Amino acid sequence: MERIPILRMGDFLLVTIQVDMHDELAITLQDDLSERISKTSARGVLIDISALDMVDSFIGRMIGTISGLSKIMDAETVLVGMQPAVAITLVELGLTLPGVITALNVERGMNLLRERVQSE
Amino acid sequence: MNVLKSGSQAVRIEQDVVLARQTARKLAVEAGLRLVDQTKLVTAASELARNTVVYGRGGDMDWELLEDERRKGLRLTFRDQGPGIADMKLAMTDGWTSGSGLGLGLTGAKRLVDDFSVESAPGEGTRVMICKWT
């Protein structure tokens, strides 16, 4: 079955979404990620969506769920790399991703995660 | 208004939603829509295609590449033979959903395009048309 790879970088997990996500793939990612957080005791999750050329309400909801889920499991989620056209569309669609922390790129996202984990 | 090109494709299963998005993107580029407008149209198409699969029990997407004196456009029509929408006013309310969604599908799609129309009656399926112009 098709899967989105989850890479481990120290205390953090890195997910780079590079395929046009269908709904089942999004749900599989949710399951895989919660399992990996539990197994690795990861403190943070970085989701890179710079390769996604659109985010609809389904994918948006999945991102929100992952963020909420990881919070319950004591890990922070940062969403990075959203393309400007995608951001404009999301806002107009009415999806503002409440509770999801975002950063412009992977580097800034990593810094943000480190800060948040250290300050705890 | 001239129809430069037209076609149709099935929207039956979940994977068809991805295919509908890809077709919409290709045609939006061909129509000459700018990137933000392409993204809006593709996102609206994704919402409507999912509605067709989930609520309409599958259907089709018709596409037409249009041209008038000043501009080009892409029109997409999603039609299904599903249960239809009983209360249109309710269905067009932000945040209302009959299923497990966020309730942004129809209203969100409407906000993302230039022209929008929906026809539906209980037991007679649903037909949603969207259009974006250059």
Image: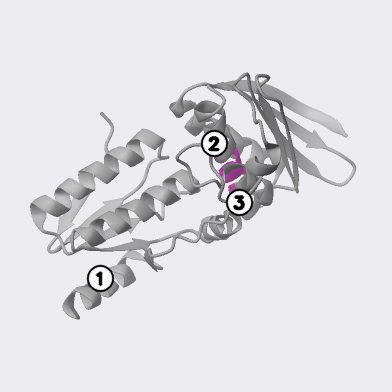
Magenta segment includes B10 = no
Q: Which residues are magenta?
A: B39-46
Q: Which residue is mark 2?
A: B21
Spatial distance from mark 1 to mark 3, Cα to Cα?
Answer: 34 Å
How packed mark 3 is, by other alpha carbons closer than 10 Å (few <14, some 14-19, many 20 or more), is some
Q: Residue at x 60, y 43 (%)?
A: B44
Please tell me whether mark 1 sits on a helix, a strand or a loop: helix
Amino acid found under the numbered disc labelled 2: Arg
Q: Which residue is mark 3?
A: B94
Residue situated in front as seen by the camera: A97 or B8: A97
Outermost bottom residue: A119
Q: Which residue is mark 1?
A: A113
Q: Is residue B64 above or below residue A119?
A: above
Amino acid found under the numbered disc labelled 3: Asp
x then y, percent, for residue B111: 67, 51
Q: Residue B57 bears which disc, if any?
A: none
Side (left or right) of A40 relative to B28: left
Can residue A4 be seen here? Answer: no
Spatial distance from mark 2 to mark 1, Cα to Cα?
Answer: 33 Å
